Amino acid sequence: MIEKLLYLTYIPLNEAPKSGSSVRPQKMKEAFETKNMVVKSFGGINNNIRLRRKTVSEIKELLKRWRPDACYIEPPSGPMFYLGDVLLIKRIHKMGIPISIFYRDAYWKYPEYINEKKLSFKDCIKQKIIKLMQMYQLRVFEKNIDLIYFPSISMVREFDCPHKDALPPGGIVPNVKDKTELSNPLQFIFVGGAARNHGTFLTLEAFEMLNKSGVKAKVIYVCPEFQWKNLGIDQDKYSEWLEVIHTSGDENLKPLYERADVALLTAPRTFYRDIAVPIKIYEYISYLKPILVTDCTETARIVEDNHVGWVTKDDISSVFHKLAELCDNPEEIIRIRENMKEARNNNLWSSRAEKVIRDLETVKQG
């Protein structure tokens, strides 16, 4: 039985999450703390070597007087920059403490999906070094960690780890007002990154077609300010139906979700996007927002398996036709919304934490 858990991550745990990659570590920590066990959590900024050295030293001191039953790790998006973090994993393994880890990103395996523009020589060298670090650290994980989790079944198949499984993101039950009536015109929301390969132009051009002869639907587009500025979009061109907001965190997003009827994840297909699982899809489910997605494999599977939205092809015309169909048949949105509470309850962060605990108990007993 797991009664004492050591939880390691690489973000500041005393700050509100500012991106998708920092949401998951916070939510897993909160989920573990609701279980009947003692959880010792350690965070910190991955690229702050001085802070990481201090954190690792504190963990080593703790392990001299407190032995956890298991250890769970939420690593950074890239490699661990402080070697001491890698050596700590070896040390915990040598103590006979079961360890599981969530392997967050595999972009280093598919460099063609990282960048939209040509890299400078300096950046190419930097990228090569980071790739070598991640290759080395994956070998360390394979030898010293009992179970490696990946975001999806598709990504599980991309790795040859001896002990692996899928652990997708989860959701919450937020304290928000349930929207009983649809907006007129319909109100859509997108929360995520703004980039050509994220589908920003695909989405805007589809809505431009939809609203050509009058506003049929509006969009709340939530993204980081610097990403939006980098695109150089003439926002005035879409001012009748587009509202761009730069914010993050549950409290700031709640009122935006309360206004929305449908959520968007309309991005172009790539090999990497086919195997990845955006954390936002479970956030949309948390807020009971029916989701319109393009046919990226894992995203489409989640939507179809949970009956929480619609899948369309990843081109402007297909997205436009689906948007027009929803505007003409708003009862379809209400029908989907009625399915979403069950989907939310089946995909909570607490369920993900329970799986980790069960799996670590199996390792401990084995």
Image (spheres, rainbow, N blue to C red):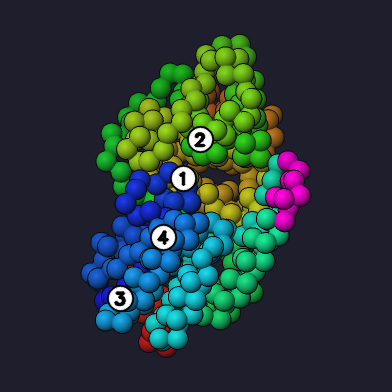
Residue depth check, mark 3 versus mark 4: number of the one nearer the observer? 4
Three-letter residue code for mark 4: Leu
Distance from Cα at disc 1 to Cα at disc 3: 30 Å
> Can you identify the residue that label 3 sits on?
62
**Label 1 with label 3: CB-CB less than 8 Å:** no
Residue density around tag 1, few if under 14, some if 14–19, many if 20 or more, within 10 Å: some
> Can you identify the residue that label 1 sits on?
19
> Can you identify the residue that label 2 sits on?
224
**Label 2 with label 1: CB-CB less than 8 Å:** yes
Residue density around tag 3, few if under 14, some if 14–19, many if 20 or more, within 10 Å: few
Distance from Cα at disc 4 to Cα at disc 1: 21 Å
Query: Which residue range is magenta in the image?
Result: 117-125
Task: Tell me if residue 51 is in the magenta stretch.
Answer: no
Three-letter residue code for mark 1: Ser
Quarter of the image with the N terminus is: bottom left
Distance from Cα at disc 4 to Cα at disc 2: 26 Å
Q: Position of residue 242 (x, y in %)?
A: 52, 21
Task: Report the residue at 44% width, 61% height from top.
Answer: 50
**Label 3 with label 4: CB-CB less than 8 Å:** no
Q: For the residue labelled by badge 2, is the local secondary structure a helix, a strand or a loop?
A: loop
